Amino acid sequence: MKALTVFFKEVKENLRDKRTVMSALLYGPLIGPIMFVAILSTSVTRDLNKADQPLKVPVIGAQYAPNLIRALKQQGLQPEPPIADPEAAVRHQDADLVLRIPASYGKAWSKGESAQVEVIYDASRHDTSGPEQRLEKMLRTYAASQGAMRLVARGLSPDLMAPIRIDVRDQSTPESRAGMMFGILPYFFVLTVFLGGMYLAIDLTAGERERQSLEPLFANPLPRWKILLGKLGAICAFSLASLLISVVAFGVAGRFVPTDKLGMTLDLGVAFGARVLLLMLPLVVLLAALQTLVAAFAKSYREAQTYLQILMFVPIVPSIMLTFSPVKVATWMYAVPVLAQQIGITQLLRGSAVGAPQIGLCLACGFAAALVALLATARVYRSERLAISA
């Protein structure tokens, strides 16, 4: 009951703090969904609109290959006037890409030789990869059709040029493709939990220490561990509220992402949200204990804020690791806090089953790690130096 008294006291006092409320219940849980919808919707819509429109490309030497230009027009190319210096135009972003046909094109074509064309573009620009691939596909289609006609004209079968026929059978599903594209989503949930309790953890330890209000609290005839439990309960409550808002916000935001146009299925509904909350429970307690532990070593609010901002980068490590070095999911990964949440939520996004053994391992090991952090924090709370502000 005494720990609950501390819990309700801290929650009530911090609900009056605009900075804590805005961070835990507004900025933290909503910044991810807003970025999610704004960036993805804009990017996807732009790319789809470009794919539906004629491809405008400056063409140098169009007079040397009229048949090629005619065939490319039928595939959606809209030739633009030639540019004097195409390399400089592409480098300075005056043109996305340029098609150059040399004067020797017609001579090589009439001899039945390979006629060369050049596609000039900048691979370092993200917005040019789509148009370049589209133009290259057009050229390859024309080359394949003309090569087949040359063989037929010589009384040969076009199959002679294709001794091996490759049939690519994609085993991905709409859900797995969505999981690949939205693999950053688990980090948003971890970040939301971190931000949801960060300012509260700072204020309840380093903040009170700086205001010299921690010493009178410790002077009460109340075991230190009960004070700690009350404070941790308040931090966890704010973190859980932040996570719940974020899960609901992502569920709403997911409806505005045009995944159907990309051949993907993104299910962020109630079932997904419930499993995310379950997987994140041990991490809520673990981060609350770690934040309180780190804040206990700071003598001022600003110092604790600096320490926790450094700690904030730790959860991003699994996301970076899995993005650049994908690994086969193994059961033991669910025993590693943060990595377990990253793996589990990604599997849910991919439509893969996360069974009771995996969830149980995640909960057991996560709460065990939280208990270790809690015991370390309780030991620091027993120190009389914690109440001293200077």
Image: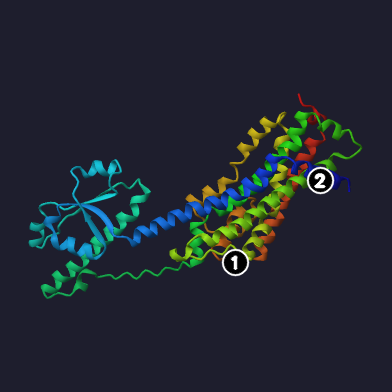
Could one spot residue 329 in this view of the protein?
no
Point out residue 251 in the picture as x, y percentages from the top left corner: 59, 60
Q: Is residue 227 left or right of residue 58?
A: right
Q: Amino acid at mark 2?
A: Phe
Residue 177 is tagged as: none
Specify which label sits upstream in the sequence, 2 or 1: 2
Q: Residues within 10 Å of mark 1 (few under 14, many from 20)?
A: few
Farthest residue to the right: give it.
221
Give how far across and how far down residue 129 sits, in percent: 34, 53
Residue at x 62%, y 50% (from the top left corner): 29
Q: Quadrant of residue 222?
A: top right
Q: Quadrant of the C terminus?
A: top right
Task: Name the image colouring.
Answer: rainbow
Identified at 61% across, 59% down, the residue is 331
Q: Residue at x 61, y 47 (%)?
A: 191
- Which residue corresponds to mark 2? 7
Vertical relation: 389 (above or below) 83: above
Q: Is residue 94 visible?
A: yes
- Please give the name of the residue rendered at 58% of the width and 62% of the height, measured from the top-left corner: 268
Residue 314 x, y percent position in the rendering: 60, 43
Q: Position of residue 202 (x, y in %)?
A: 71, 37
Residue 321 versus residue 163 in the image, above or below: above
Q: Is residue 315 shown left or right of residue 90?
A: right
Numbered disc 2: secondary structure:
helix
Q: Please identify, in this view, whether the residue under mark 2 or under mark 1 is nearer the observer.
A: 2
Asked if labels 1 and 2 touch by Cβ distance under 8 angstroms, the answer is no
In the foreground, 308 or 333: 308
Residue hosting label 1 = 353
Amino acid at circle 1? Ala
